[in-house]
Amino acid sequence: MVYILFLFWYPIKENRAAFIVISFLLGFCIDLFSDTLALHAAATVTVAYIRPTIMRFVFGVNYEFQSFKLSNSTRAQQITFLALLIITHHLIFFMLESFSLSNMLLILKKIVFTGLATLILCLLFGSLFSAKKD
């Protein structure tokens, strides 16, 4: 689920309402092609909505200033931010997919293993498309 990189890379100071609408459209398009009945849309909209809270948790108050850029933060903060986005997305997605707490162990397994695979792929794609710092 590497489309989570969109939620990670979206500019911080852009219009939040537009970001939530675009996130819904992204999730909806993925739902259309994967036949998942709006699970991706619900998960991406939820993550887009709580993204400022996650950013405040990871970066502190610093991200609210005009001069803050994701590329200026430490690599550990970036990985933590991406991991929290992935965990939140997968938690919403797999809870809605199962729609039952009776299979909690299965849900946790899916969150952990799919989350690790997603994190590794996102880090690989991120390093592939990032600009080199000299």
Image (tube, grey):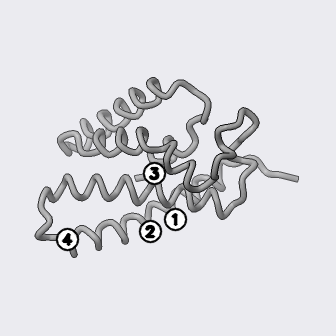
Closer to the chain start, of discs 2 and 4, is: 4
Q: From the viewer's perspective, is 24 left or right of 32?
A: right
Check contact, mark 1 vs mark 3: CB within 8 A: no
Q: Position of residue 79 (x, y in %)?
A: 59, 61
Identity of the amino acid at label 1? Ile
Mark 2 in CB contact with mark 4 (< 8 angstroms): no
Is residue 94 rendered to the left or right of residue 100? right
The correct choice, above or below, for 26 with respect to 132 in the image is: above
Residues at badges 2 and 1 in contact (C-beta under 8 Å)? Answer: yes
For the residues labelled 4 and 3, say whether their Cβ atoms are less than 8 Å apart. no
Residue that label 3 marks: 2
Residue 14 circle label = none
Residue bearing the label numbered 1: 120
The kind of residue on which mark 2 rests is Leu
Which residue type carries mark 4? Met
The image shows residue 49 at horizontal and vertical percentages of 41, 38
Contact, CB < 8 Å: mark 4 with mark 1? no
Q: Secondary structure at mark 1?
A: helix
Q: Secondary structure at mark 4?
A: helix
Q: Which residue is mark 2?
A: 116
Residue matched to label 4:
104
Quarter assignment of residue 64:
top right
